[in-house]
Amino acid sequence: MLAEAALALGVWLQLAAGQEAPGRGAQPSISNAEGDILFLLDSSGSVSYYEFSKVKEFMWDLVRPFSFGPRDVQTSIIHISTTPTMEFPFDRYQSRGGVQQAIRDTQQLMGDTNTGQALSYAKEKFFSNEAGARPEVPKVLVWVTDGFSTDDISEPMQLLKDMGVTVFIVSTGRGNYLELSAAASQPPEKHLHFVDVDDLPIITKELRDAMLDVIQANRLHAVDITSSSFRLMWPKLLSQETGYYSLEYAPTNNLADKRTTQLSGAHTSFTVSNLTPETTYEVALVPESNVHYFPPQTTRVTTLAEEITPAQLLISESGPHSFQVSWAPTPDSVAAYQVLYGPLPGASAQLLEVNGKRNSTVVENLAPNTTYLVTVTAIYRSGKEKSLSAKACTQEEGSKVRHLRFEDMGSNTLKASWDAADGKVLGYRVRCRRQTGPSSLISVSPQIHSVLLTDLPSGTTNKVCVKPMYKNQAGKGLCRMVRMQPATEARGYRHRQRA
């Protein structure tokens, strides 16, 4: 049960061999969006192959979390070149995989940068059934440009905005700010970005959130998606008096395993839990009312990959008879944690049971100046277990410095003195953090209880800390703030203990 890995006190332990936990970096799907997104892609000869490839990566990262389909998001690309060209119609690709591959397969056309022509062409396609565009859904134009155009853009861009299209502009070159801020939807702080092509990932989330403000649908959708749960939200349709909701959900690959929950008409949200990681669920919300007919609302939600815990352990607040153990992450899929601890060397061990919602506990009644092996085990609701271990050391009894005092020796020099700490001290470390100038660290033998601190300019306030060193760890240090008297003040000495 004990994991083999064990690192020093106070160090965060990572998963073995630096392997990432499954699903790390995974983005939850966005199921409450409906709109047509058109990318105006600079495919002209003014863009290098490298820049073109980076922009394609950015485009995919931008739309990756969206759900695609006739009742969700649709997307297309129009090339800016000598003659504008549509890469594919809006309704051709109805899945993430299809959209991703289509963007990857997009090839640069070269030619002139006739952006104005491309905008006029976009106005036609945005409202064309033949291009797969849908009436009555929000329209979003994302124009990624290096800042140059060989024709006028102001008139066709204004026509697009007058027709209800929301325009976002990303300039990767030296575009004219006044021209581009006038072209983008207002306000420009939300709709216009200037960024180097290598830094496009920096603005991805901010731009996506701004787009979502435009295309977010007022319907059943999922938020707070984890590996084992998600929260459903929907617009208010009923009341406590006018009816109730029937909520049904089942895995897409096993619709026979349908679960049904009845909710009062006052509900507008509900958390679905105890789900399987990395599984797509079909969800239906059926409003039942004797007053009005409301059609069922449906959505599809995919749970995230299961978080692996504990992935990190931290030992802190160590004293002679106790220390605190903390761990992360704390996913909902864990029912409880077990903390096993025992002295090294030795065969005895004790066990603590901790609620699955907690991420720390204090281990008490320990022996001073002793090294312990601590193992935290996550007990998953599925029955699986995962463990991680660390070494922890208790301090010696009375292992702290007392009565730190100073004496002004003149010439910007102080003498720091202290009383000996208890126990088998191996030495002392004296750290001086200067208000001006570099910090210094002095190590002395256990028989020495004073040091000279130099290069402390008059009028400065400096921090001095003395810490005893023991075999397994450092003891408790004592710190004081000390002020060097200005030359105009009377000689003498002031110091104050840090709060």
Image (cartoon, grey):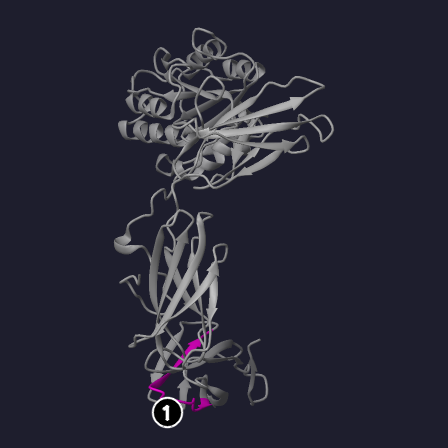
Count of picture labels: 1
Is residue 422 in the magenta section? Answer: yes
Q: Quadrant of residue 173?
A: top left
Above or below, 375 relative to 370: above
Instruction: Please name the residue shown 43% across and 91% down the image.
Output: 420
Instruction: Please name the residue shown 60% across and 18% down the image.
Output: 295
- In terms of secondary structure, where does tag 1 sit? loop
Q: In the rendered image, is residue 214 in sight?
A: yes
| Residue sitting at the far top | 130
Above or below, 98 relative to 188: above
Q: In the rendered image, is residue 174 in sight?
A: no
Which residue is label 1 attached to? 448
Q: Percent position (x, y) of residue 102?
A: 32, 21
**Quadrant containing the N terminus in the rendered view:** bottom left
Start and end of the magenta stretch? Answer: 417-434
Instruction: Please name the residue shown 45% across and 24% down the image.
Output: 142
Instruction: Please name the residue shown 30% across and 65% down the image.
Output: 6
Q: Nearer the viewer, residue 51 or 102?
A: 102
Q: Nearer the viewer, residue 312 or 116?
A: 312
**Quadrant containing the C terminus in the rendered view:** bottom right
Q: Quadrant of residue 235?
A: top right
Q: Percent position (x, y) of residue 219?
A: 58, 25
**Three-letter amino acid code at disc 1?**
Ile
Q: Percent position (x, y) of residue 7?
A: 31, 66
